[in-house]
Image: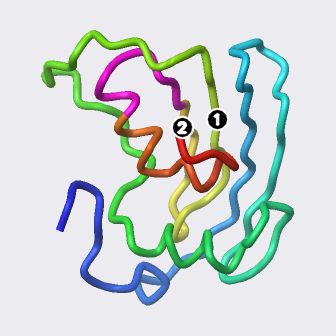
Amino acid sequence: MGRGESSGSGMDAGGETSLDISVSLSGKEAPTKEWTLRCPDGGTLPSPEQACEQLDGLDDPFAAVPKDVACTQVYGGPQIATVTGTFRGERVDARFSRTDGCEIERWDQVAFLFGTTT
């Protein structure tokens, strides 16, 4: 299993998943796209059932990169996304960017929430 993947069902872990997602592909403060996701199968995000299933397979998709991790200094673009709400009943307030290798990996893990694959 890769980083952030779960061997069990997150929905079985209990708790509600209700997320508000804002994405700016140009890096500006004003979001260019906004979605909601209500698991198991609601919200305005395209294919919410599939997104819930993908999210369910991840252990901690909203965790920040630990401060003691060395990251490659590769710039992936100006994209910025925020995800707020609850995941498995726990509060979420996460910011994603593509400013270095660690952040790019983190972005790519949940890109399905942003309507992008990169």
The residue to which callout 2 is attached is 94
Q: Nearer the viewer, residue 85 or 25?
A: 25
Q: Residue at x 21, y 20 (%)?
A: 71
Q: Residue at x 69, y 57 (%)?
A: 19
**Residue 111 percent coordinates (x, y):** 55, 48
Q: Secondary structure at mark 2?
A: strand
**Residue 90 percent coordinates (x, y):** 51, 60
Residue 74, quarter of picture:
top left
- Which tag, 1 or 2, sits closer to the chain's start? 1
Question: Mark 1 and 2 residues: CB-CB less than 8 Å, in contact?
Answer: yes
Q: Nearer the viewer, residue 52 or 101?
A: 101
Does the magenta-highlighted stretch encompass residue 92? no
- Which amino acid, by three-letter code, is at mark 2? Ala
Q: For the N terminus, give its image quadrant.
A: bottom left
Q: Secondary structure at mark 1?
A: strand
Does the magenta-highlighted stretch encompass residue 103? yes
> Does residue 49 lie above or below 58 as drawn?
below
**Residue 29 percent coordinates (x, y):** 77, 14
Q: Residues within 10 Å of mark 2 (few under 14, many from 20)?
A: some
**Residue 63 percent coordinates (x, y):** 37, 44
Report the side of 8 relative to 91 (left or right).
left
Q: Which mark is residue 63?
A: none
Residue 24, quarter of picture:
top right
The answer for how far apart the CA atoms under marks 1 and 2 are is: 6 Å
Q: Residue at x 63, y 53 (%)?
A: 113
Q: Residues within 10 Å of mark 1 (few under 14, many from 20)?
A: some
Q: Which mark is residue 82?
A: 1
Chain part drawn in magenta: 96-104
Q: Residue at x 75, y 50 (%)?
A: 20
